[in-house]
Amino acid sequence: DGRHLCYQLHSATGTSATTLHYISRTNQLAVGFADGYLSLWNLKTLKKEYHCQLEGGRVPVYAVIFQEPENDPRSCCYLWAVQSAQDFEADVLSLHLLQLAFG
């Protein structure tokens, strides 16, 4: 019927989004930002459920990958977040593992 869902995605400081990843298993949208923040949006309620700066600091988040363990008895899944930047002295690359727990 021609309807589309639209989000205006920006961090609290107005920084632009650098990566998006839809997680079909949990119906969430993971959003990485240029200032190192990561947000999780619930697409059923259209509310932000999680927002924090990764340990790598103000380094852009360039990728987010969802992982669901095959034989893990715990009710959890994982998000891998990749931060990457280049500066004059060295390249910066950080990989972070976040656990999503479900009740």
Image (spheres, helix red, strand yellow):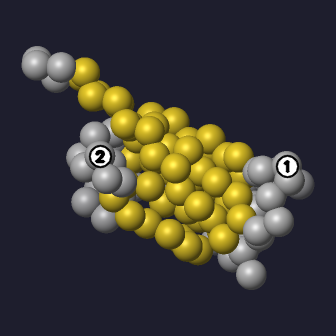
Element type where label 1 sits in the image: loop
Crowding at mark 2 (Cα within 10 Å: few <14, some 14-19, many 20+):
some
Please determine whether, in this image, residue 13 is positioned above or below residue 65: below
Q: Is residue 66 visible?
A: yes
The residue at the point 82 percent across, 66 percent down is 73
Indicate left or right for 78 with 36 as reference.
right
- Specify the quadrant of the image occupied by residue 83: top left
Provide residue 4's location: percent of width, then percent of height. 73, 53
Q: Is residue 73 left or right of residue 50?
A: right
Q: Residues within 10 Å of mark 1 (few under 14, many from 20)?
A: few
Q: Assign the N terminus to one quadrant of the image.
A: bottom right
Compared with 49, 5 (above or below) is above
Which amino acid, by three-letter code, is at mark 1? Glu
Instruction: Choose between 39 and 6: the one closer to the eye.
Output: 39
The dot on residue 62 is: none
User: Outermost residue toward the bottom?
Assistant: 103
Give the percent coordinates (x, y) of residue 27.
75, 61
On the image, numbered disc 1 is attached to which residue?
A: 70
Q: Nearer the viewer, mark 1 or mark 2?
A: 1
Residue 94: quadrant of the picture: top left
Residue type at tag 2: Gly
Residue at numbered disc 2: 56
> How far is mark 1 from mark 2, CA to CA?
29 Å
Taking the image as shown, residue 80 lies to the left or right of residue 70, namely left
Query: Residue 77, position in %: x, y?
Result: 70, 58
Residue nearer the viewer, 20 or 97:
97
Quick check: marks 1 and 2 in contact, CB under 8 Å?
A: no
Does label 1 or label 2 sit earlier along the sequence?
Answer: 2
| Residue 14: image location, x then y, percent | 29, 56
